[in-house]
Image (spheres, helix red, strand yellow):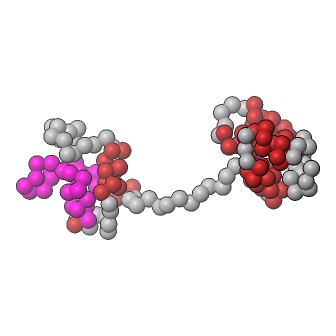
Amino acid sequence: MKKESQVRLSRQERQELRRLLHGGLQPVRTVLRALALRQLAGGQTVRQVAMNLALTPKTVWLTSQRYRQGDLERALYERPRPGKAAVLSAQDRQRIMSLVCGSPPQGRARWTVRLLTEEVVKRKLVPRVGRETIRVLLKSHELKPWRGKNAVRG
């Protein structure tokens, strides 16, 4: 067995893995990493573990590296990813929803997504926003202002 893939688990870590594997619903990635660590600690090579668990050898090797660099927590779970910041704040969403609940501009029978997007920027509720953002916001509130009969207005 290569020295780089060698994993030595303490008794407490083994118990933690056992609880994790027998404890109910867990993400698949977490379970596979726990199984990989347990098999590596049992003396199997990276290639053997990869074949047993239908993973790539690189995945198994990276799991063992994360365990050696950190601890069991780091090996099993991913760090939170930053993601992209929300385009609209809660206050912005509230303002837009109140605009939708009101009557449409003069000469219009109802709101459309395109009209709403233009009006939101024109009224300076937000500096800029796309039609898709507005559409998703309306869909999340189950509003369809472009329909004649709407939950907002009769």
Residue 27 as seen in the image, left or right of residue 66: left
> Which residue occupies 73% across, 40% down?
54
**Which quadrant of the figure has residue 52?**
top right
> Which residue occupies 83% across, 42% down?
48
**Which quadrant of the figure has residue 114?**
bottom left
Identify which residue, 74 or 92, lies in the foreground.
74
Residue 121 placement (x, y as % from top left): 26, 65
How many marks the image carries: the answer is 0
> Which residue occupies 72% across, 44% down?
55
Magenta highlight range: 95-121
Residue 88 as seen in the image, left or right of residue 111: right
**Is 94 situated above or below 37?**
below
Identify which residue, 29 or 80, lies in the foreground.
29
Residue 6 placement (x, y as % from top left): 89, 51
Residue 22 placement (x, y as % from top left): 75, 31
- Residue 108 magenta: yes
Q: Quadrant of the C terminus?
A: top left
**Which quadrant of the figure has residue 16?**
top right
Residue 59 as seen in the image, left or right of residue 83: right
> Which residue occupies 83% across, 56% down?
68
Work out whether residue 130 can be spotted.
yes
**Is 26 situated above or below 2?**
above
Work out whether residue 63 can be spotted.
no
Residue 147 placement (x, y as % from top left): 19, 41
Residue 12 as seen in the image, left or right of residue 28: right
Residue furthest out toward the left: 107
- Residue 39 magenta: no
